[in-house]
Amino acid sequence: MSLLSVDNLQVSFPTPRGRVKVVDGVSFDLGRERLGIVGESGSGKSITGRAILRLIRPPGRVSGRLVFDGRDLAGLSERDMRKLRGARISMIMQDPRYSLNPVMTVGTQIEEALRVHERLPRHAMRARVRAMLEAVRIDDPDRVARLYPHEVSGGMGQRVMIAMMLIPRPSLLIADEPTSALDVSVQGDVLRLIDDLVRDHGMGLILISHDLPLVARYCDRIVVMNAGRILETCPAGALNTARHPYTQGLLAAVPQMPETRAELPVMERAT
């Protein structure tokens, strides 16, 4: 049974020349598995993730069918959607510097993510926060919980964001470029952490990224998007044998180790 079903999703925004579709007829099903959505910047990846959570506000328009765990998301009231967000579906944003509240300690913000959806005694809530910080491999969680966002490193800030999104124990996690603001040395640690937590909790994962090799390493299936449309879907292990010319072009543009080509291929554009 599908955890999430997306059918003919369309998202448009107004421009001086009329409305433009930034997501155009996207359809896919997701079980309790790891699905990667890849493509260049502007391909519609992040907008797709936000549309699933109904975070597209006017003048943006969203149409299509979104069914999560048997419930039609389009038919839910905003109050019901607020109950669903975080508790059942969580989203890790790209950069914790812009997602965390600068005037609240990280511990208070993680508590708040839990308090919205569960009523627990204060000591039980603090114990959950401490356990979650330990789960995301933060040493000395009591000290870190007292810090403000500007006092933590980029890698630790991303771990705090992961803790915030996972503490309500959601069924689906949408990770939007979760390592884009991190050093290469830290990216692998954060992705392995997300992978371990998803596996341990039997969650569904949508990993949004422009990094094809990275997504192929951590996902079961891959969806390739361009100009708001899905061009190809394939098992992660078969990415190198993808057939669509656009996917082949993306793969060819990835630097190799060692790099023997005199010139790195680029995507050709029609003028």
Image (spheres, rainbow, N blue to C red):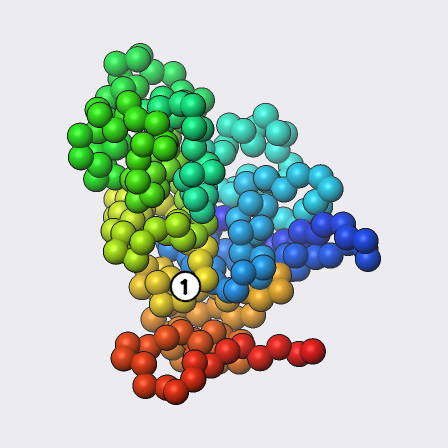
Query: How far from the left and from the top, in percent, is residue 259?
Result: 32, 81
Please name the residue shown 33% across and 43% down the image: 154
Choose top left, top right, bottom left or bottom right for residue 270: bottom right
| Residue 56 located left or right of residue 179 | right
Query: How far from the left and from the top, in percent, is residue 89?
Result: 46, 39
Please name the residue shown 30% across and 26% down the image: 147
Q: Is residue 4 visible?
A: yes
- The answer to whether 5 is drawn above or below residue 226 in the figure is above
Q: Is residue 195 visible?
A: no
Badge 1: residue crowd in 10 Å (few <14, some 14–19, many ≥20): some
Choose top left, top right, bottom left or bottom right for residue 136: top left
Please name the residue shown 50% across and 32% down the image: 84
Q: Which amino acid does label 1 sit on?
A: Asp
Q: How many numbered discs sit on the rendered protein?
A: 1
Camera-nearest residue between 82 and 29: 82
Query: How far from the left and from the top, in percent, is residue 226?
Result: 58, 66
- The answer to whether 97 is drawn above or below residue 8 in the figure is above
- The answer to whether 112 is drawn above or below residue 177 in the figure is above
| Residue 211 located left or right of residue 201 | right
Query: How far from the left and from the top, in percent, is residue 230?
Result: 57, 65
Residue beneath disc 1 = 211
